[in-house]
Structures are given as C-alpha cells and as structure tokens.
Image: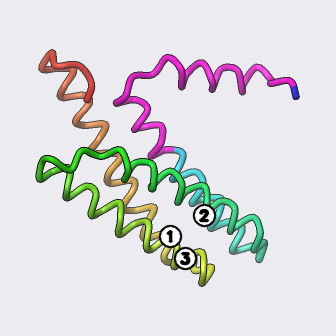
Amino acid sequence: MALNPYQIYQQNAVMMAGPGELTAMLYEGAIRFLNQARQAITKKDIPAAHQSLIRAQDIISYLNNTVNTTYEVGANLAAIYDYVLRRLVEANMKKDAAIIDEAIDLIKDLSATWREAMTRARQNGAGAP
C-alpha cells in the first residue's frame, strides 16, 4: 500500500528525531489514542475503543520498559507508568471514560514535564534528554 505524503512526513519526523523528541512523540500518541478511545466509548463503538486503548497501553508499556530505574527519578517514573497501565487495562475492561480522562491528565503532566526538561537541557547546553 502506497504511503501518502503526510505518512511519509510522519515517518521522516520519527526517523530524524532524537531520543528526547521520540519520548515526547510517544506521549502525544498515547494522548491521541486515549482521546479516540473516549470518543469511541461515547459512540458505543466498543471495538474501536478497545483498539485505541490497546495502542495507548502499548505506548505506555514501551515507555515503562525503556525507563532507567537505576536512579530514583527513573524508578518513580516507572511506578507512574505502571499505575497508568493498570488504569488503562481497567478502563478497557469497563469501557470507562472517567478512567481514560484520569490517564490523559497524568500523561499530559508527564509530557509537559518532559518538554520542560528538554528545554532546560538545551538551555544548559546538555542536549535533549
């Protein structure tokens, strides 16, 4: 199947992004899938809600598996990812939009913190995290 120009642009953006920017993109993707899941639940489209929640769970699982838990901040981040993942599984079983909203809020907070860390790292000349 041929890719359209937007898909090619997206692929190039991912291939050119550094690790810090990729993490930010993953947060954005998780939020996008959770918004899609919430909309699908509202429309009573259970298969679409399930699919979107699974995609968000996959992203959070990936982030959790790649976090460095050697340091306290990494261990704390892994605990947050674990909590969000458990809540997403519960949201998927119950098709509960309120749980999805909770997860979106947590991921938005993580995303904002991550973006701030990347900005500060660049300002300090350390490069992006």
Give, as a three-letter code, the residue at label 3.
Ala
Which badge, 2 or 1, comes first in the chain's sequence? 2
Residue topped by disc 3: 91
Amino acid type of the residue tagged 1 in the rendering:
Leu
Disc 1 secondary structure class: helix
Task: Locate residue 70 relative to residue 50 in the image: left or right.
Answer: left
Q: Tell me if residue 96 comes above or below residue 22 in the rendering.
A: below
Left of 110 or right of it: where is 104?
A: right
Q: Position of residue 52 (x, y in %)?
A: 65, 59
Nearer the N terminus, badge 3 or badge 2? 2
User: Distance from label 3 to label 2 (Cα)?
Assistant: 8 Å
Residue ID at (50%, 70%):
88
Category of crowding for the residue at label 3, using alpha-carbon neighbours closer than 10 angstroms: few (below 14), some (14–19), many (at least 20): many
Which label sits on residue 53? 2
Q: Which residues are magenta?
A: 2-28
For the residues bearing labels 3 and 2, Cβ distance under 8 angstroms: yes
Question: How many discs appear?
Answer: 3
Q: Is residue 22 magenta?
A: yes
Q: Quadrant of residue 8?
A: top right
Q: Quadrant of residue 34?
A: bottom right
| Residue that badge 1 annotates | 88
Tell me whether circle 3 and circle 1 mark residues in contact (CB < 8 Å): yes
Q: CA distance from mark 2 to mark 1?
A: 7 Å
Considering every residue shown, the one lying at the far right of the view is 1
Q: Which quarter of the rendering shows the C terminus?
A: top left
In front: 68, or 47? 68
